[in-house]
């Protein structure tokens, strides 16, 4: 039977507080303890979707105290570096391809900011999936050895870190494996919220936690099957994105006709 983790990205003082409050109430109802990816010093204008919340950091502390796992979501969420990511889904990222000196500065600064607000980041979530071997090396030296990314059915160890795969962007029933679903509260549509609520009602007992995953999978090495799955899943995502762009283009043409 499949197990699930929920991950919510792009947390910062100017996020959509109204949508998140609604989501948090739903998660609390089913005792779900998700990963919350926090941008330490957001400089990405696309994440400024609401007035700055002066109580944001206090709210993050309450989530942490309630068992939510705080993730370091990059540094400023500004993706202007061109490099080869270990999860190559985007050309421009914040970390992949940057020098070790620059990456260390960003990661140290991000950790310091979160710690100054009383938060302890336990896991790494890279903006746009952009990170490389240098990123993992620096993270490990600074005490973060769990990564939420990659494609596999089960978590695995690679480069001295535990990778907890993140394979889905919406909830769906799977036959087996450990599946992380990434959601973005800022852009979550009402129908997506309703779908999530129905899924949690039916499958809440199958949701696990980062701590449980660490206990069960921390010694599993990456297998040949993982590599095959990774290749297949990447191609599937490329096709999905291509079909989405084609549909959007067709809608634009129809609207202009």
Image (cartoon, rainbow, N blue to C red):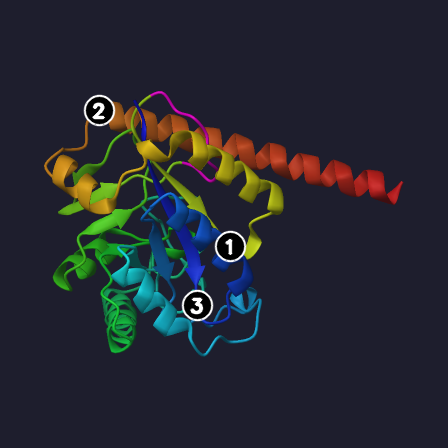
**Circle 1: element type:** helix
Residue 29 shows up from this direction: yes
Tell me, for residue 224, which label it has, or none: 2
Residue 90 shows up from this direction: no
Q: Residue at position x 47%, y 72% from top?
A: 43
Which residue position is annotated with label 1? 22
Q: Residue at position x 53%, y 30% from top?
A: 239
- Picture coordinates of residue 70, whole percent (x, y): 29, 59
Query: Residue 216 is drawn in which quadrant?
Result: top left
- Relative to the observer, which residue lies in front, 141 or 68? 68
Quarter the N terminus occupies: top left
Query: Residue 227 is drawn in which quadrant?
Result: top left
Q: Considering only order in the chain, which callout, 3 or 1, is on the residue closer to the N terminus?
A: 3
Image vertical order of residue 90 relative to residue 3, above or below:
below
- Picture coordinates of residue 165, whole percent (x, y): 30, 39
- Relative to the observer, which residue lies in front, 232 or 145? 145
- Picture coordinates of residue 220, whole percent (x, y): 13, 33
Camera-near label (2 vs 3) is: 3
**Circle 3: element type:** loop
Q: Main secondary structure of the magenta part?
A: loop
Which residue position is annotated with label 3? 12
Image vertical order of residue 92 relative to residue 205, above or below:
below
Q: Is residue 174 magenta?
A: yes
Q: Which residues are magenta?
A: 168-175
Q: Distance between the Cα atoms at labels 1 and 3?
A: 17 Å
Is mark 1 in CB contact (under 8 Å) with mark 2?
no
**Circle 2: element type:** helix
Q: Residue at position x 20%, y 40% from top?
A: 213
């Amino acid at each position: 039977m499949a197990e699930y983790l929920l991950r919510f990205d792009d947390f910062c003082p100017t996020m959509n507080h109204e949508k998140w409050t609604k989501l948090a109430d739903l998660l609390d109802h089913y005792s779900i303890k998700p990963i919350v990816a926090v941008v330490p010093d957001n400089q990405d204008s696309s994440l400024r979707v609401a007035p700055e919340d002066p109580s944001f950091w206090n709210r993050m502390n309450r989530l942490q105290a309630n068992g939510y796992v705080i993730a370091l979501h990059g540094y400023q969420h500004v993706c202007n570096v061109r490099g080869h990511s270990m999860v190559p889904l985007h050309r421009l990222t914040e970390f992949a391809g940057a020098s070790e000196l620059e990456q260390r500065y960003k990661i140290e600064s991000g950790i310091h900011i979160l710690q100054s607000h009383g938060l302890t980041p336990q896991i790494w979530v890279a903006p746009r999936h952009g990170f490389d071997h240098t990123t993992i090396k620096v993270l490990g030296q600074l005490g973060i050895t769990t990564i939420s990314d990659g494609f596999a059915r089960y978590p695995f160890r690679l480069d001295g870190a535990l990778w907890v795969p993140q394979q889905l962007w919406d909830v769906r029933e799977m036959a087996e494996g450990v599946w992380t679903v990434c959601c973005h509260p800022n852009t979550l549509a009402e129908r997506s919220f309703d779908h999530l609520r129905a899924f949690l009602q039916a499958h809440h007992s199958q949701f696990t936690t980062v701590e449980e995953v660490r206990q069960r999978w921390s010694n599993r090495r990456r297998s040949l099957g993982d590599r095959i799955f990774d290749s297949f899943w990447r191609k599937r995502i490329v096709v999905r994105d291509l079909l989405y762009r084609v549909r959007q283009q067709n809608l634009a043409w129809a609207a202009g006709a």
